[in-house]
Image (tube, helix red, strand yellow):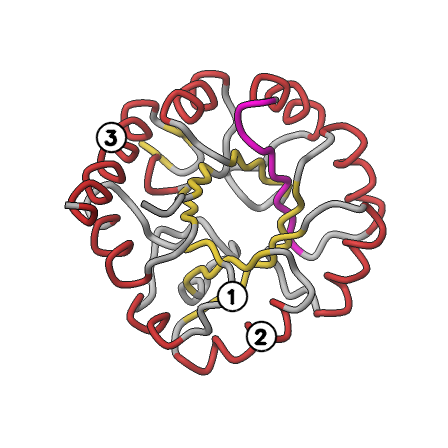
Amino acid sequence: MEKLDIKICGLKTDDALAAALAGGASHVGFIFFPKSPRNIAPSEAGRLRLAASGRAKAVAVTVDAGDALLDGIVAAMAPDLLQLHGAESVERVAEVKARYGLPVIKALSVRETVDLAAARAYAGVADRLLFDAKPPKGSELPGGNGVSFDWRLLAGIDRGIDYLLSGGLNAANIGQALSLARPSGIDISSGVESAPGVKDPALIAAFFRAVAAARDKTAA
């Protein structure tokens, strides 16, 4: 069975991080975006990421961040990867990679097939892509909105493009998502929360069980 990366994103507490690590998360994400209920201070993220060292890769998630903000995050947290979740251009992705010497995940918002057209240009620069649903009208958050897109859109994507699937994932639909999209990695945030920004260790554990069940079914 092919390896599946699992990223639990928007972590803020010791209990949530412990649940993510216990479930076998390959990546743990920390969000640096003031408008998000999952926003965390770089120093606190740095403290939490120490517990993940050697167990999961720590990802710093930003939205159209300037160099000064990124400098502070990298210095305080020492992330393993940077995730750019805004409207960053291909050139900006290349700049960030060169400045910090860290792998970069570039998030792209998807609603219809045309939205995947940018994937190839970014795939040539970013180390990995993340396909998330376009935010609902009026939302100030580029991600973590609990909405999904039609995963069938990904059926025709170049198999050479390495991506994480995100957007509205939860224990109830992860089996269908894996079956339709067949991603090499998944990213979940609001789907394991009891309230916006409040991760629920029980929901995190349930999600990992659902992923395992779906993969066992596929392998059978």
Compared with 119, 195 (above or below) is: above
Q: Residue at x 33, y 72 (%)?
A: 155
Name the quadrant containing residue 75.
top right
| Image quadrant containing the C terminus | top left
Q: Residue at x 39, y 78 (%)?
A: 112
Residues drawn in magenta: 54-63
| Image quadrant containing the N terminus | top left
Q: Secondary structure at mark 2?
A: helix
In space, the residues marked 3 and 1 are separated at their CA atoms by: 29 Å
The residue beneath circle 3 is 206
Q: Are marks 3 and 1 in contact (CB under 8 Å)?
A: no
The residue beneath circle 2 is 120
Can you give x and y, in whole percent of width and height, for residue 20 in the image?
42, 27
Horizontal side, residue 15 vs residue 64: left or right: left
Callout 3, which amino acid? Ala
Horizontal side, residue 101 vs residue 5: left or right: right
Q: Nearer the viewer, residue 134 or 164?
A: 164
Residue 163: in magenta span: no
Q: Which mark is residue 22?
A: none
Can you give x and y, in whole percent of width and height, for residue 126 in the image?
65, 60
In space, the residues marked 3 and 2 are separated at their CA atoms by: 34 Å
